[in-house]
């Protein structure tokens, strides 16, 4: 949940709850004060009436009179208003009580005169008391309720301003590129956010140091391993020339050296295309032109096996890293050539549909069993395991590298059986194609 939304909801809930409780307490207090006020009026009226002499037995009042009274002596009615019954409207007991007559409920005050033993009973309808209290409390609460939307807006703005340093930090982190490990600086930083920024900057510094060490290690490994391997390849080649080409031990040695060189090259290449190390320097790439260049580079190898390669493509552009895309094409086409038989066929297709570019590489080899399709992207996994063809140079990293590059470009890759060539069909879909296609 958003911190801002959480704070606004909590504050508004607390304010609303407190306002509601205060309104209830205010209602109760208003009712009590109104009741006390009316009771005091009844007491005053009773005291006034009891001091008067009765000259007529009945006093006419309107139907909606706000007052009624009776005067009794020795349980005989001496004087009463016309809205009272003939019996006593309250017990002959001094004090307040509530009774029903004339179709409504009344608050009655009974008082006895100590001089002539007269009882005065003064009544007032209860309903006006509640109406007065309700009007008072509503007059006090309604402005508060109407002010809650404005209060929500003010609280939202205040909380937003209070969280502005956190928002600025979020924007800075969002704008950072993958290879940007520079320190974060927030101008309007709060006291609570300073430790977070310092911790992040310390973490970035440690990551930068770790990446630099890894880069130096990769560079050193590339230099230190390739140089002796090159010497070893030259020496094995010279030894092969001296001992003759028919020596199986020398042939195995040359093949092992070639495989070792291939493994080292693939491992270093995998390190370069690792998402954590990859520099997202994307540019507009002509996928068709790149594919033509890779085919030209691999053509001597393809031609040596008397294979036929076809390219069916329209000029299509994608956003990506030039080195990574070239590596992807080289691995896919090279694998197709390795696993297609001699005099086999390789078909490369580039299609553009709306905003997507699809690359399809097919071969006429044996393909991959469905049970192994989910495993071929694992590092160092080779189809067939120990039973793979030893004449095919490889270390099980080609498709792992391809998968990394596909992930870096937010593309999708699928493996299936080729309906045309009956071998493996690799399909890579790049989203976000650019410009229009032109047939080549």
Image (cartoon, rainbow, N blue to C red):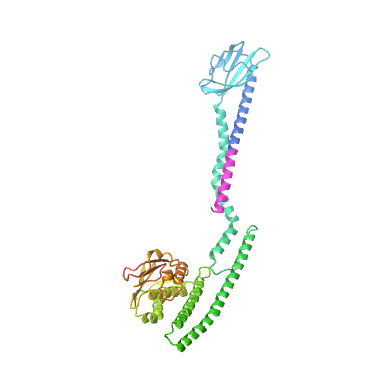
Image vertical order of residue 308 relative to residue 275, above or below: below
Image vertical order of residue 91 relative to residue 154, above or below: above
Magenta residue span: 1-22
Residue name at image x 55 percent, y 28 percent: 128
Seen in the image, is 280 located left or right of residue 311? Answer: right
Residue 44: quarter of image: top right
Q: Is the magenta stretch mostly helix, strand or loop?
A: helix
Q: Can residue 184 be seen in this view?
A: no
Residue 424 falls within the magenta-colored stretch: no
Residue name at image x 58 percent, y 53 percent: 159
Seen in the image, is 23 located left or right of residue 349? Answer: right
Question: Looking at this view, is 167 or 271 the one in front?
Answer: 271
Residue 169 in picture, x, y percent from top left: 58, 61
Residue 286: quarter of image: bottom left
Q: Quadrant of the C terminus?
A: bottom left
* Residue ranking furthest to the bottom: 242
Question: Looking at this view, is 180 or 345 the one in front?
Answer: 345
Residue 103 in picture, x, y percent from top left: 50, 21
Residue name at image x 57 percent, y 59 percent: 167
Image vertical order of residue 154 relative to residue 262, above or below: above
* Residue ranking furthest to the left: 420
Image vertical order of residue 45 relative to residue 212, above or below: above
Residue 63 in picture, x, y percent from top left: 51, 22
């Amino acid at each position: 949940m958003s911190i801002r939304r959480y704070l606004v909801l909590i504050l508004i809930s607390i304010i609303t709850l407190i306002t509601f409780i205060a309104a209830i307490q205010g209602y109760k207090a208003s009712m009590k004060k109104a009741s006390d006020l009316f009771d005091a009026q009844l007491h005053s009226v009773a005291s006034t009436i009891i001091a008067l002499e009765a000259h007529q037995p009945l006093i006419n009042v309107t139907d909606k009179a706000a007052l009624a009274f009776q005067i009794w002596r020795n349980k005989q009615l001496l004087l009463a208003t016309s809205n009272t019954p003939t019996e006593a409207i309250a017990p002959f007991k001094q004090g307040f009580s509530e009774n029903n007559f004339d179709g409504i409920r009344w608050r009655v005050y009974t008082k006895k005169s100590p001089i002539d033993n007269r009882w005065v009973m003064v009544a007032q309808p209860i309903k006006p008391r509640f109406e007065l209290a309700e009007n008072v409390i509503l007059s006090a609460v309604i402005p508060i309720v109407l002010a809650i939307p404005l209060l929500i807006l003010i609280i939202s703005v205040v909380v937003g301003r209070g969280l502005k340093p956190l928002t600025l930090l979020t924007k800075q982190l969002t704008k950072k590129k993958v290879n940007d490990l520079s320190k974060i600086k927030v101008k309007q930083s709060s006291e609570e956010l300073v430790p977070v920024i310092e911790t992040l900057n310390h973490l970035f510094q440690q990551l930068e140091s770790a990446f630099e060490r890894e880069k130096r290690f990769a560079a050193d490994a590339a230099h230190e391993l390739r140089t002796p391997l090159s010497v070893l390849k030259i020496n094995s080649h010279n030894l092969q020339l001296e001992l003759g080409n028919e020596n199986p031990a020398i042939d195995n040695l040359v093949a092992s050296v070639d495989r070792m060189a291939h493994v080292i090259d693939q491992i270093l290449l995998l390190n370069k295309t690792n998402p954590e190390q990859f520099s997202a320097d994307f540019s507009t790439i002509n996928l068709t032109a790149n594919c033509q260049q890779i085919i030209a580079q691999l053509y001597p190898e393809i031609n040596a096996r008397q294979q036929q390669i076809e390219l069916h493509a329209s000029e299509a552009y994608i956003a990506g890293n030039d080195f990574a895309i070239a590596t992807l094409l080289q691995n896919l086409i090279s694998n197709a050539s390795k696993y297609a038989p001699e005099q086999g066929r390789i078909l490369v297709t580039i299609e553009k549909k709306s905003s997507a570019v699809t690359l399809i590489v097919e071969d006429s080899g044996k393909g991959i069993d469905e049970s192994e399709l989910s495993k071929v992207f694992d590092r160092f996994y080779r189809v067939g395991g120990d039973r793979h063809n030893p004449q095919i140079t490889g270390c099980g990293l080609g498709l792992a590298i391809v998968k990394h590059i596909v992930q870096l470009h937010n593309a999708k890759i699928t493996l299936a059986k080729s309906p045309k060539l009956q071998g493996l069909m690799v399909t890579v879909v790049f989203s976000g194609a650019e410009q229009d296609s032109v047939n080549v």
